[in-house]
Image (tube, helix red, strand yellow):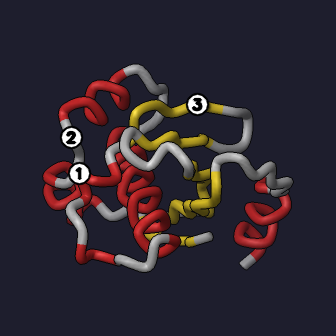
């Protein structure tokens, strides 16, 4: 497993956009969330997977291209184009996005609402 947490920061939009593929940008157009938040989510999902694989920034972010995103009430699940054996669960924590990468055949039970509640109290 791997985890990444990043602040949603308008100053990073050009860097985040440069690491998104055309396919990923196309996916984001259909989602009802702020574009910057979704770019940050893409970044954290890829970073979490790179940590799970223990390769960090040594591999191209395009290697971790996201094929599809599924929205649930409390989180978004990302499925990878080239790393189909993994997926991520991503959610908001105030002005941060948190992504957790894990093996796709694994079912995890994660109470994102409880985690969000702790962060909203901080």
Q: Position of residue 75 (x, y in %)?
A: 66, 44
Q: Is residue 31 above or below residue 14?
A: above
Q: Which residue is mark 2?
A: 21
Q: Nearer the viewer, residue 21 or 82?
A: 82
Closer to the camera in the image, 95 or 109: 109
Residue bearing the label numbered 3: 70
**95 in relation to 35, above or below:** below
Taking the image as shown, residue 23 lies to the left or right of residue 56, namely: left
Q: Which type of secondary structure does the marked residue at label 1 adopt?
A: helix
Q: Is residue 76 above or below residue 58?
A: above
Q: Is residue 102 visible?
A: yes
Q: CA distance from mark 2 to mark 1?
A: 7 Å
In the image, is 89 to the left or to the right of 61? right
What SS does tag 2 mark?
loop
Is residue 4 at all visible to an observer of this figure? no
Estimate how packed mark 3 is, as few (under 14), some (14 to 19) or many (20 or more) residues with alpha carbons within 10 Å: few
Q: Which quadrant of the rendered structure holds the N terminus?
A: bottom right
> Is label 1 in contact with label 3 (beta carbons under 8 Å)?
no
């Amino acid at each position: 497993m791997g985890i990444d947490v990043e602040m949603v920061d308008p100053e990073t939009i050009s860097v985040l956009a440069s690491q998104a593929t055309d396919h990923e940008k196309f996916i984001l157009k259909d989602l009802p969330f702020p574009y910057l938040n979704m770019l940050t989510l893409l970044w954290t999902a890829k970073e979490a997977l790179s940590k799970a694989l223990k390769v960090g920034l040594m591999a191209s972010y395009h290697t971790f291209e996201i094929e599809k995103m599924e929205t649930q009430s409390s989180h978004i699940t990302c499925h990878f184009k080239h790393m189909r054996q993994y997926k991520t669960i991503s959610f908001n924590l105030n002005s941060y996005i948190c992504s957790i990468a894990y093996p796709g055949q694994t079912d995890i039970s994660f109470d994102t609402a409880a985690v969000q509640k702790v962060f909203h109290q901080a």
